[in-house]
Image (cartoon, rainbow, N blue to C red):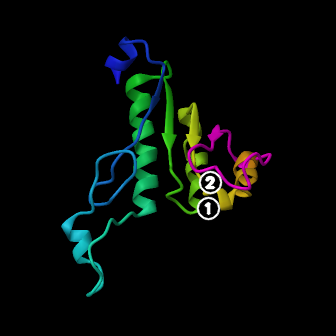
Amino acid sequence: MRQWQARGYRHVRVQLSVPGYATYGAAGETSKEVQQARPTGIGPSPVFEPTPYVNNTIKMFEHLRAKLGFDVELIHDVHERVPPAQALQLAKALEPYRLFFLEDCFAPEDAAWFQHVRSQSSTPLAMGSCSSTATSGCPW
């Protein structure tokens, strides 16, 4: 991260993988142990668990701010991977780490949740790659 800062980058998107689970935006595969816990007859496929992801994301930002301070703007893309209530909890928990923005907390069909987050959290929100729908342009 510091090498990017030294090159003049001021805004950095940070993602993480959760050990044992598939993820988005970072290397990570579902472990053999998790695959084996699937019911008999269900083929292997990526497994994503929102709770470990949310908990580890909060820890990641705590670590980054402790190491880097607030001289770099941090961005994170949830990519619609958690239920809306957990996205609200995540936005609230990330407030002390002053993100530049938190992207794609909700699927476009859950756009009404933006009003709930805006009324309960100061974390800036963005909706990006997943917002090409009839709800685009709604006053969130």
Q: Identify which residue, 3 or 45, lies in the foreground.
A: 45
Which circle marks residue 85 in the picture?
A: 1
Magenta highlight: main SS:
loop
First to last magenta residue range: 120-140
* Kind of residue at badge 2: Leu
Image height of 123 relative to 65, above or below: below
Q: Residue at x 37, y 26 (%)?
A: 67
Vertical placement of 3 versus 30: above or below?
Answer: above
Q: Is residue 128 left or right of residue 139?
A: left
Horizontally, is 67 left or right of 10 in the view? left
The answer to whether residue 38 is above or below residue 127 is below
Image location of residue 117, percent across then percent down: 69, 50
Q: Nearer the viewer, residue 47 or 2?
A: 47
Q: Is residue 131 left or right of residue 11?
A: right
Outermost residue, right side: 139
- Please say whether residue 137 is one of the residues in the magenta stretch: yes
Label 1: how many Cα within 10 Å (few below 14, some 14–19, many 20+): few
- State the residue at coordinates (27%, 62%): 30
Q: Per the image, is 14 magenta?
A: no
How many dots with numbers? Answer: 2
Report x, y in % for residue 58: 46, 45
Considering the image in quadrants, where does the N terminus appear?
top left
**Residue denoted by label 2:** 88
Q: Secondary structure at mark 1?
A: helix
For image coordinates 44% across by 29% down, the residue present is 65
In contact (CB < 8 Å): disc 2 and disc 1: yes
The local secondary structure at tag 2 comes to helix
| Distance in Å between CA atoms under marks 2 and 1 | 5 Å
Q: From this view, report whether residue 39 is shown above or below residue 59.
A: below
Report which quarter residue 135 is drawn in: bottom right
